[in-house]
Amino acid sequence: MSAPVSPPLIGRIAGFVARTWRAMSFRREIAELATWTDSQLDDIGLTRADVRRALREPLFSDPSRVLRNSVGERRLARDEPALNVVVLPAAADRPATRRGPQLAA
């Protein structure tokens, strides 16, 4: 006679099956993107390298996360200035703090 399976274990197994099913479904859709032309991929903000990188993800992980990150990073890069330079005031112009240098009066 076997011991009954606890409800939390059933829930975890069901969650794993659902996540795996979703990841495999996304993987099939992303594999379809690999057949698109570079122009079509560019229209949706992706590159062929993005698609290849997503398909290299482990089998049971969600490859669409990689594509979302790639598109998001590209959008951020376009909105940012060419150089991310922070200009700090000279030490003499900053107020003295307990942790910073103490200026002579």
Image: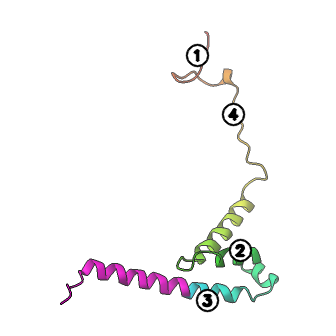
Q: Position of residue 14 (x, y in %)?
A: 36, 84
| Among the two numbered marks 4 and 1 on one chain, the one whose residue lies closer to the N terminus | 4
Where does the image place residue 68, in percent across and percent down from the top left? Answer: 62, 72
Mark 1 or mark 3: name the one nearer the start of the chain.
Answer: 3
- What residue is shown with label 1? 102
Q: Are marks 1 and 3 in contact (CB under 8 Å)?
A: no
Q: For the residues carrying marks 2 and 4, which lies nearer the camera in this image?
A: 2
Q: What is the CA distance from the residue labelled 1 to the residue labelled 2?
A: 51 Å
User: Percent from the top left, x then y, of residue 69?
Assistant: 63, 68
Q: Secondary structure at mark 4?
A: loop
Left or right, 67 with reference to 20 = right
Taking the view exactly as shown, the residue that stands out farthest to the left is: 1
Q: Is residue 81 left or right of residue 57?
A: right
Of residues 60 and 73, which is closer to you in this image? Answer: 60
Label ID, residue 50 = 2
In the picture of the structure, the residue carrying the numbered disc 4 is: 88
Q: Main secondary structure of the magenta part?
A: helix
Amino acid beneath label 4: Leu
Residue sitting at x 71%, y 65%:
74
Mark closer to the observer (1, 2): 2
Q: Earlier in the sequence, mark 3 or mark 4?
A: 3
Identify residue type, mark 3.
Arg
Nearer to the camera, 87 or 23: 23
Q: Which residue is mark 3?
A: 28
Q: Are marks 3 and 4 in contact (CB under 8 Å)?
A: no
Tell me how far mark 3 sits from mark 2, CA to CA. Answer: 15 Å
Q: Nearer the viewer, mark 1 or mark 3?
A: 3
What's the distance in space between the residues labelled 4 and 1, CA to CA? 17 Å
Helix or strand or loop: what does disc 3 sit on? helix
Up the image or down, 51 lies above or below 99; here it is below
